[in-house]
Amino acid sequence: MARRPRDARAAPATREIRVTIAELAPGGDGVAIGELDGERRAIFMRGVALGDVVRVAVDGSRRPARGRVLELVEIGPGRVAPECPHVELCGGCDWMHLSPAAQAAAHRALVAAALPPSWQGHDIVVHQAPRRLGYRTRARLHVRVSGGRAIVGMHGAGTREPVPVDACVVLDPRVERARVLLPALFEGAHGHGDVQLALGRKPPGADAALPVLDIQWSGALAGACYGRLERGVTEGRWSGARVHYGEVERPAIVGDPTPWMLGADGQPLRLAPGGFAQASEEANAVLGARVAAALEAIQQSRAGAVDARVLRVVELYAGAGNFTVLLANPSTTVTAVEASREACEASRQNLAARALRAHVVEADAALQPWPPQTDVVVLDPPRTGARAVAERLVASRIRHVVYVSCDPSTLRRDLAVLEGSYAPRAIETFEMFPQTSHVETLIRLERVPGTNSDRRAP
């Protein structure tokens, strides 16, 4: 069969049109409706604000169509000048061109759109960000070494390549000081990797906590890199580091790599090295207070009931105990389920430091059976959501659910499963990640009377 000539392989046809941004979608893109070849099509593009009028080059060969902004014709009411000069290249802050009010309104709209049809119109409470800049006490950076020179940064907008910047305005200054040292740290290495920056515990007599590094590396790390890590510890640049390298099962440890954060209860919270924690300590405190308030509301709803007793709580995807230390009190029994062994150990230590009791179980949250007569399930799953848990809840007798979500798309999917069996009692959003399209959501649910009342919790 004859091959098509190389010059006949034309690039996808593009055309220029003028459109108005009608909505902002999960993932941060703006959406406009335009006419392409006589058909009204949704066109997705980055870097736009609600109400912007733009001239855009559209690739109509894709579905949905993708657009590239050529000219900002009219400015939407929520657009502001970005506070970072690197925002066009760096993919870390996709909504820095939106005002704080516009970001919160867009986040609220995303969560409202994720609600099932019968829940539409339910009141949504919005919690603004305590800080818009300098708030991130955790960050994941990408490193690529070429010719002995290390390039360190967030992924570029629309790429998988790191973009170096001279300063990151959303990082906590303590984390930012460690970030600027990373290119020199990896000089002479080969390959690529990720570095998770967090804060360790503040040393006695020190003014501030020192950063910790968790390094995942593919390639070759020069001995000089380890020497620089050691000197960084002795000279007080960071508290410690873990290095996962090649096929080695156990990471190399330099200094004390244990990350800590200020817990939602205002006390130091030990974390698992490389494990999950919220990006903003201040916003996490607001979220934690509302989780505790949700549990209190459930307890009050049962006050005076004939079968009132100590509240039996199951917490899924419990991590290092960020919420566990708030849920555990004299009027509850708490079973905290978490798959990470290191996170479970950190949770037990956090509970012991507070003289609190909870049963911490190392297990898959989607599969672990719930204790008999469980009253409340609290879950804070990863971005992939918790569809299997939602299906189990529908088939159970669990009366109350407190669902914390970081992704409206998977939240929509899971709530569609729960609709009919549960009804919302409170819906709240939290500006946990200012300058980005990400939003944290808390939904308190109560079982609809008469649904699956003859079944037992799985």
Image: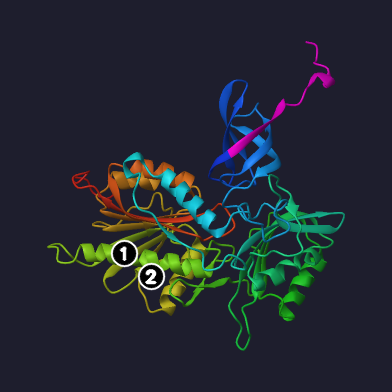
Note whether residue 431 is visible: yes
Q: Nearer the viewer, residue 180 or 53?
A: 53
The image shows residue 290 at horizontal and vertical percentages of: 38, 65
Instruction: Return the residue found at the far left.
Output: 306
Relative placement, left or right, of 223 versus 380 is: right
Report x, y in % for residue 43: 60, 34
* Disc marking residue 326: 2
Q: Nearer the viewer, residue 242 or 310?
A: 310
Q: Which residue is mark 1?
A: 295
440 vs 60: above or below: below
Q: Earlier in the sequence, mark 2 or mark 1?
A: 1
> Helix, strand, or loop for circle 2?
helix
Decide if residue 340 is on the left or right side of residue 452: right
Task: Please give the range of residues in magenta.
Answer: 1-20
Magenta residue check for 18: yes
Q: Is residue 322 visible?
A: no
> Residue at coordinates 14% horizontally, 63% vertically from top-left?
305
Element on which disc 1 rests: helix
Does the residue at mark 2 contact the one at mark 1 (Cβ under 8 Å)?
A: yes
Vertically, is 102 above or below 253? above
What distance separates the C-alpha of mark 2 from that of mark 1?
9 Å
The quadrant of the rendering that contains the N terminus is top right
Which color scheme is applied? Answer: rainbow
Q: Amino acid at mark 1?
A: Leu
> Tag 2: residue type?
Leu
Residue at image x 50%, y 62%?
Answer: 341
Which image quadrant is residue 158 in? Answer: top right
Residue at position x 37%, y 53% in the image: 368
Relative placement, left or right, of 148 versus 343 is right
Is residue 267 toward the left or the right of residue 246 in the image?
left
